[in-house]
Amino acid sequence: MAATNILKIDNLAFERNDTLLFEPVSLQLNSGEALHIEGANGAGKTTFFQILINLLEPSAGSVYFRGQTFSECRYDYLSDILFIGHQSGVKATLSVEENLRWMSPDNTSAEKIALALQSVGLEHYANIPCYRLSAGQHRRVALARLVTTTASLWYLDEPFAALDKQGVAFIEGCMQQHLNSGGAMVFSSHQDLVKIEARSYRLQSYRGVM
Amino acid sequence: MYNYLSGGFSAYLYRDLLLGIRNKTDLVKPLIFFLLISALVPLAIAPEAERLAQLAPGIIWILAVLATLLSVERLFSDDLQDGSLEQMLLSPNMLILPILGKIAAHWLMIGLPLTLLSPLIGIWFSLPVVAVIPMILSLALGTAVLSLIGAVGAALTLPRQGGVLLALLVMPLYMPVLIFGSATIQSAVDGLDWTAPLAILAAFLAIAIALCPLAINAGLRLAKNG
Amino acid sequence: MNLNLQWTWFHRLGSPRWFYQKTQRWLPWLSFIMLSLLIVGLVWGLAYAPPDAKQGNSFRIIYVHVPASVVALAGYYLMAIAGAVGLIWRIKLSYMLMRSAAPIGAALTFIALVTGAIWGKPTWGAYWVWDARITSMLILLFLYIGVMALRHTYSSHEAADKASAILGLVGMVNVPIIYKSVDWWQTLHQPATIKFTGAPSMHPDMFMPLVVMIVGFYIFYAVSLILFTRAEILRREYRASWVKQLVTDKLAEK
């Protein structure tokens, strides 16, 4: 299978309080590839992700998804991405299963939900409200989406935070499987131990003058 | 179990109702506020039926405005904190429908109970019986407008979570609703035609449904940038 | 989209500088016209216009009150439109104008309210009457303060600009509704006991100085807006090379 271009980032820049946050970014991502975004704290990793998921508008430059700009393919793009950020998106008063169902695609089967819960080790917690879970378990609820999702492009902002070894191994498994099946992903992580084969890109804080 | 059709309207309506029912205290607070303050009014003014009946339309409407204002602040802030707002903004569907779903849930949990409780306040304030139906209708329509406008303020003040600023932004916009809402009741008390101010409230509702979600959508997108 | 973004990028960097340099030349002229109009209008209105038949000399406060009200209301629209232009075409200068318009408009609204109250005492026997126009002006003051206060909710200029612009637009839709509602409410409760001296019924000798004052206030508004915006430009663009050049030149002059 020939690798097709999924994402093309062209001279992307973002301004906050009239200063560029990072040096303009130009990148390409093909199917089956992973991209590891590195950068010191405050280098703008989270902002970078928010631009990619169309929550923030870039101040200059553009992002192409399968050769089209956001405005041309907004619906297709947003239906084909998965984003897991710092905040889990898990509602404390809903049960584990209700949360996962809410965050999964509409037609996810009950078996798939059960499988996802099993693979994050929460199968016995399905009907427990999430406020009774620990921080790590909260995170696992959110990460169980990696099993149920049908998206081909994953954005994972610090997916390994607050997880134990087992959890890390689970995510790595999901990521590897996703890459093998032709998916693509962009992730950030402070751990260098990630076993996924990925290109890295270092976000540089902006130093120039306007 | 869930209905994911209609582009997110019913999904978000259902979810917010479910969340509301599970956090019962948040749901009951505005209603208790509404009842408590109503009970204070006769003590502060006078227990005479005539004077109370004269003040009733205005007081009922001011309390409805305050109760909505108190509750609307949290419409989006919980979602912002736990990250589900981020996921909502990523939905490929138009955001208008999820937003309207959330506001509909808010109205069902705040505006509708207030409307249903209002006859009790009417009895407390010796409101003439002829004014009860106009009061219920005006509150039903008016509180929906209040929820919609309040949601605009809540979306715009999201990074600092409302408070006095929310009241400052929203109160001037509430003024027309307050005027025509209490006028509906007052007209009925005075034996005038009360359908005219009620029709204007309905017109406000139509405008608010059409325009508020646009402003809310734009406001929510800024919250992450705060 | 790519080209478009490139274009806005240049445009956004270019226009504040253009504005700063252009207005440098306009300011002396505008200030001169403003001062002449205000002096002529004030002297004419306060000293030469005939006293009002009913109100005597106390009516003369309209030469400040009416222009302030008119410009305050128009200023709200200017602010909201500037915000809309910023939202649609992403022009920074437009946001700067919007930000500068808010405090000027709020100040004029405040002046209108205070002069109204001073005028109200001899005319109606009370400093404050819940008249439709006064109530609308009070709400307008709240709207202005809201736009100013909302900025502090956001830690980045860009988000604050957009939020204020959205609020301005929401207000713009509401101002006529509020005005009409208050008007209707007032006729319901106070059937026409209070009437302003309407402009058309005014004698030309009274009316002409008022026109001069209104035009003078508009130009005063323009001058203040330009000054505020220039300060805002310097505050935001202080990293730009042309601002640095400007500072070195100024220092060299001394």
Image (cartoon, rainbow, N blue to C red):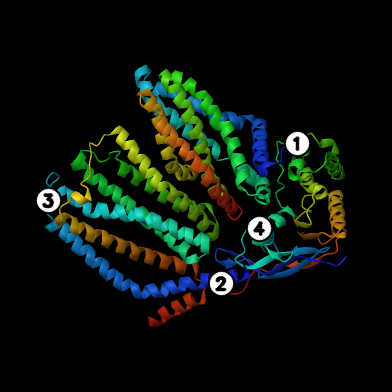
Residue at 51 percent across and 47 percent down: it is: B211
Under circle 2, the secondary element is helix
Few, some or many C-alpha atoms within 10 Å of disc 2 (few <14, some 14-19, many ≥20)? few
Q: Quadrant of the C terminus of chain A?
A: bottom right
Residue at disc 4, secondary structure: loop
Where residue A28 appears, as percent x and y from the top left, is 75, 68
- Residue C41 figure quarter: bottom left
Q: Is B69 on the left-hand or right-hand side of B104?
A: left
Type of the residue with mark 1: Ser
Q: Is B164 situated above or below B43? A: below
Q: Kindly report which numbered mark, 1 or 3, lies closer to the viewer in this rendering.
A: 3
Q: Which of these two is toward me, A66 or A23?
A: A66
Chain designation of label 4:
A
Q: Which badge, 2 or 3, is on the more N-terminal residue?
A: 2
Q: Label 2, on which residue? A: C7
Mark drawn on residue C51: 3
Same-chain check, marks 4 and 2 = no
Mark 3 surroundings within 10 Å by alpha-carbon count, few (fewer than 14), some (14 through 19), many (20 or more): some
**Residue drawn 34% across the image and 73% down it:** C26
Q: Which residue is mark 4?
A: A54
User: Do discs 1 and 2 share a chain?
Assistant: no
Give the residue pinned by disc 1: A95
For the residues labelled 4 and 2, the Cα–Cα distance comes to: 21 Å
Chain containing mark 2: C
* Rendered image quadrant of residue A102: top right
Taking C133 as reference, is A11 left or right? right
Q: Please, what is the three-letter code of the amino acid marked with disc 4? A: Asn
How far, Cα to Cα, is label 1 from label 4? 29 Å
Q: How far across and how far down the image is residue A189, in percent?
A: 77, 59
**In the image, what residue type sits under mark 3?**
Pro
Give the x, y percent position of residue A115.
86, 43
Rounded to the nearest whole Å, what is the CA distance between mark 3 and mark 4? 64 Å
